[in-house]
Amino acid sequence: MSAARDPAYSSVAPGQPQLFGRVYQPRLGVHWSDRIAHAILVAAGVALAIFLLAPMAMILAKSAQDRAGEFVGLANFAEYFRTPALARSIWNSVWVSALVTAITIPLAFTFAYGLTRSCMRHKALLRNIALVPILAPSLLAAISFIFWFGNQGLLKPLMGETQIYGAPGIVVSLVFATFPHALMILVTALSLTDARLYEAADALGTRAARKFWTITIPGAKYGLISAAMVVFTYSLSDFGIPKVIGGNFNMLATDIFKLVIGQQDFAKGAVVAIILLVPVAVTYVVDGWVHKRQSALLSARSVPYVPRPSRGYDRTMAAYCWLTGLAMLAVLGMAAYASFVKLWPYNFSLSLDHYRMGIVEAGIFEAYVNSVTMAVWCASLGAVFIFLTAYLLEKTRGLDAWRPFVRLLAVLPMGVPGMVLGLGYIFFFVQEANPLHALYGSMAILVICTTVHYYTSSHLTAVTALKQIDDEFEAVSASLRVAFWRTFFRVTVPVCLPAFLEISRYLFVNAMTTVSAVMFLYSPKTVVASVAIVNLDEAGDIGAAAAMATLIVATSALVCGVYFILQVWLDRRTQAWRQS
Amino acid sequence: MSNPAPDFLVLEHIRKEFGSFVALKDVSLAVRPGELLCFLGPSGCGKTTLLRIIAGLEVQSAGRIVQAGRDISLLPPMKRDYGIVFQSYALFPNLSVADNVAYGLVNRRVARAKREARVAELLALVGMPDSGPKFPAQLSGGQQQRVAIARALATSPGLMLLDEPLSALDARVRVRLRGEIRGLQQRLGITTILVTHDQEEALSMADRIVVMNHGAIDQIGSPSEVYRNPATPFVADFVGKTNLLPAERADATGIVVGGQRFQCEMDAGLAGSARLRAFFRPEDVRVRGVNGATPNSAAATVEKVEFLGAYSRLTVRVDGIAQPLFADLSVNDLEDFRVKPGDALRVAVPAERIRVFEAPAA
């Protein structure tokens, strides 16, 4: 077996072969097992192009066409800006999102500060309470606030002349929904600061306020910017909340829906989608820049900060955190409570009527089943696709020109609001000439769209886990002539299992709660629970809507519990080799 | 082949560029069968890149590699024949020691009993016969490194590549493992390339050392050749402690350093250069029994006495020489010959111990 005579591996003559004056870079032969890796990576890139790039391109195309499909350039944009009712939505969206950001960030920062920099008790419990909104569709908050402060709300008298419907309701609901997202980022940012900076400051006799402004805030600066971007983007692109509690207050996300579903004006829907895409894309770019800066701050040798007990201060922080936590439970609890109330506001006796009559007998329990089905597919196939692609990107070699393209497609979805993605999907898949037209109205398209929508976070989780594995595993395996998939299944997957479970859990919960992306894509047979809530609310059956929202929260919580138990079990089983 | 080469691995004109950065410029060398060859140099000298090229983990920009008569220049790693050990050990954390060692045997359709026998044999070979069921995290760094070596040897590769294998270990373990690896390599007679930046490691383990600097080879030679007769000022400075002084040419058999003439041996090639550098080791500087009549001697003042365990290092100032000189003195010598900072004495350097190089262009 002389590979020297194998034409695939011919050698380079000494010296430098030149081609058109440029030094020619020789390439290694590719082993057949690596060709399999390349084939999968190409397929993954093509899939992402079809299910992300093509729909986005369709939105661009549609925005420049008239109803008959003729090219009209920027005429649709011009007409859009001439319609005051529409153009006002831009301003509405921006100021509401800015206000939500201005309220949420200080609230979440103080909470995160309490969690990381005080010695108050029950931190884990408080943290979990604060993260609860993640388990619910965003519009649950809107429903709850209607029960608290709406026309027939419990605390309506406190409102005076003010109406909760419209901007006030949107703002408070968004604050509730965005709080945990900001909190997670800020907790991370505050835990990163090096304790030695504080020790140095103490040694110099620095006062507390000065330490806060010169060490804490600069250390958390990138976290603050990042959290602000996330909250702003979330508020700008959320659909469920303004739909339920917005009344006549128009925002960009609801405009897209009205234009496309209500008026069938696809061109103008596409215009709004592009307008919505711009600020989101800007924040996305800023956030990417911030992340790069932040990772440079991280040093492996930094010492974690350990707070020292201080009675008065710890109590103040505890009081604040409990107050915030209780407010969150009050919002969540109201939806749950109202779902059991027989007839709001006339008969407050508890019953299962909304579940029995409002959901099961009304024939929309199927929507719940669909949601769970979709979430299971996303959490299994979606998670496998994302993890496998991340693995091939990070750990295999060759195909150097293709990799950056796939990497880009993996981080792009974070910059695309769900409404825009969903709209792109209808434009692209509704065409009968499209060979993938059969997907239209199927469960598969909901699974694919949702997986793509939440791709980036999952991808980054996978990449982080993969980067922590020794880079030389693949080199060692090749030297032992073991094909990459053997090492993938025997080593990489077992070592990354916790990260894989985290991705899977994340996709499950988001698939259960998402509204925006699937709003355009469901068919009568594939209505999902979150969409059913919107429809129930529109039909005035807010009790059943609350019941459905409660079902979603309960399911998400249950599934998180299952994942938690799985993690604990896994930790125990793998403890022997995980100990450092 | 009509003209069989005795060399096991031959690198011809290897060049490597990363963008506009040239990591290796035209490196050629040959590895003899059964020897332990060491790539020695400071970080960034290209030694690891060269090893990765041999392993097929990087591709050379130009050049040719022949292993055991087979051109492997463009073979993917899986088609080459070597075992590799990395600084990080790269042991699979979720597999037991035995499974790690057996990793390369599993897909070679080796019968289970035979495989287990081979694993036991290898673990015994690296001195860890009972560690099979343990996980890597339960082992010390030195033990992990031995497992990594056993894993690399399992498939009986023709070539062993060791990439800074001892750098992550603490000093005592490092010294012990040096001897063990060298002993194992000699017993198995396996051709081995070791990459290191630690000159002591290279001197104590290697059959031959390749000293690299800025992507090029400065010298290839046995440890004593490299130490005693460095080919360039860089080698002289990098391997061992040295005195490297600016000098001028006096005549065919002497140089002037700091206004004083020193007798020395000089290469004929230096005849044309006026500006030179003189090099000699601290242990070659004599301070005992030196008087005005001793050839190549000069008056000096002791500036510092540094206690380094087995020997002490004197820092002395010689009149007329700006740079201080180092002279090593064994503990016993120091006890007989008491010196302290401020003492005046005479130092001498035997003529055959001075090497002269051309001074770099300013």
Image (tube, grey):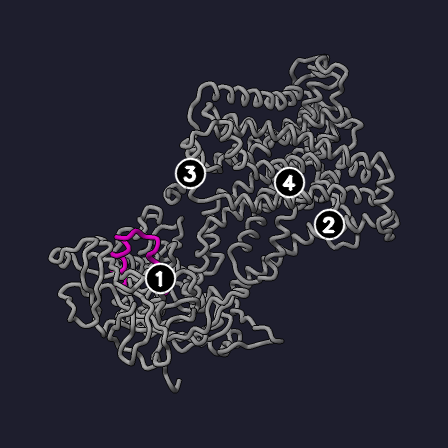
Q: Are marks 1 and 3 in contact (CB under 8 Å)?
A: no
**Image check: A119 left or right of B305?**
right
Q: Chain of mark 4?
A: A
Q: Secondary structure at mark 4?
A: helix
Where residue B97 appears, as percent x and y from the top left, is: 34, 52
Q: Chain of mark 3?
A: A
Question: Which residues lie in the magenta part?
Answer: B160-184
The correct choice, above or below, for B225 with respect to A576 in the image is below
Question: According to the image, label 3 marks what residue?
Answer: A303
Where residue A382 appears, as percent x and y from the top left, is: 60, 46
Q: Residue furthest left?
A: B336
Q: Quadrant of residue A259?
A: top right
Q: Secondary structure at mark 1?
A: strand
Q: Earlier in the sequence, mark 4 or mark 3?
A: 3
Disc 4 to disc 2, C-alpha distance: 21 Å
Q: Looking at numbered disc 1 in the image, what kind of residue is underneath it?
A: Thr
Residue B196, labelled with which disc?
1
| In this rendering, the label closer to the viewer, 4 or 2 | 2
Q: Quadrant of the C terminus of chain A?
A: top left
Disc 1 to disc 4, C-alpha distance: 55 Å
Q: Looking at numbered disc 4 in the image, what kind of residue is underneath it?
A: Met
Residue A374, labelled with which disc?
4
Q: Are marks 1 and 2 on the same chain?
A: no
Where residue A232 appears, as percent x and y from the top left, is: 67, 36
Task: Kindly tell me whether residue B130 is visible in this rendering.
Answer: yes
